[in-house]
Image: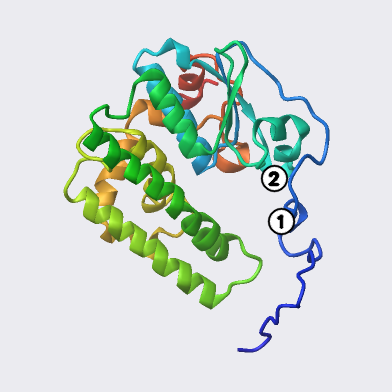
Amino acid sequence: MSHEYLPPKVWQLPPADEGKWSQINRPVSGATHEKVLPKGEHPLQLYSLGTPNGQKVTIMLEELLALGERGAEYDAHLINIGEGDQFSSGFVAVNPNSKIPALLDCSHDAPQRIFESGHILLYLAEKFGRLLPKEIAARTEVLNWLFWLQGSAPYLGGGFGHFYAYAPVKIEYAINRFTMEAKRQLDVLDKQLAQHAYIGGNEYSIADIAIWPWYGCLVLGETYDAAEFLDTDSYVHVQRWAKDIAARPAVQRGRIVNRTSAQAGLGVSERHSAADIDAVLNGKG
């Protein structure tokens, strides 16, 4: 292989000219600048962006609101990770790992911070007693798939998505490696969905809410422009499931919250009612 990279004995930070993220990411944690996070009027304060991980939480909140849970009213504040907002002192106080999404539950005497998208879904499901079965076997199956997503999505996003769509150079070995894994994961889902209406069984749950923004959008051709490359039409059961979830009104509302114009051409940065988001969906916002 020509121009093979030979790792030095001790790694050094490369120059900030190796793609967009090399100018933002760094090998240490903590805040880079002082900035207080905004706070709205509702019990839940969400700090996020309309990425797949961000959509998990807004879809969950919209589903809870659709079920009549008024305590799930939230304010959504945009954290633009492309501009380094995740490294502000305010955001680091909510999530020391500087990753979106992060949630503050202000319904307690002392606000409770919740970070990591999978944990936020679990926290909300337990707080409201919704979208997570109570019976131990069914609950365990849903949690199996919730944690499957948390372990699998980095291979799809940071692996396949990065090297196929975002890396400044196309590396055949990396693309082949992560394409194989992405297709293996789709096959896992396809076989599960051949037997069940939803990922965790025959009821819609936080497993579907977690997995759909990643794999549902992928097979529908909305992620990485890679549907043809991955032959996603061949995963017929995933396709059926993805379309069913996409048709849910709460999913349609949740997926546009905190999306920038570069992502969708529309978005809602502060959410106060379902009408606010419906206005955007109907072209009136």
Q: Give the residue number, with chain letter if any, for mark 2.
A: 82
Figure check: 186 above or below 195: below
Residue 238 makes an appearance in the image: yes
CA neighbours of label 1 inside 10 A, class few (<14), some (14 to 19), many (20+): few
Image position, residue 212 (x, y; %): 38, 43
Residue at the farthest front position: 136
- Residue flagged by tag 1: what amino acid is it? Lys
Q: How far is mark 2 from mark 1, CA to CA?
A: 8 Å
Left or right: residue 75 compared with residue 249: right
**Residue at (34%, 64%) from the top-left corner?**
184
- Residue flagged by tag 2: what amino acid is it? Gly
Choose between 211 and 90: the one closer to the eye: 90
Image quadrant in which the C terminus is located: top right
Dots 2, 1 in contact, CB < 8 A? yes
Left or right: residue 123 compared with residue 246: right
Specify how the rendered protein is coloured: rainbow
Quadrant in the rendering for residue 109: top right
Image position, residue 101 (x, y; %): 57, 35
Residue 59 makes an appearance in the image: no
Choose between 115 and 88: the one closer to the eye: 115
Image position, residue 167 (x, y; %): 62, 64
**Residue at (45%, 47%) from the top-left corner?**
150
Q: Give the residue number, with chain letter if any, for mark 1.
A: 20
**Residue at (57%, 26%) from the top-left corner?**
268
Figure check: 225 above or below 168: above
**Residue at (66%, 34%) from the top-left corner?**
79
- At numbered mark 1, what does the secondary structure look like: helix, strand or loop? helix
Figure check: 285 above or below 42: below
CA neighbours of label 2 inside 10 A, class few (<14), some (14 to 19), many (20+): few
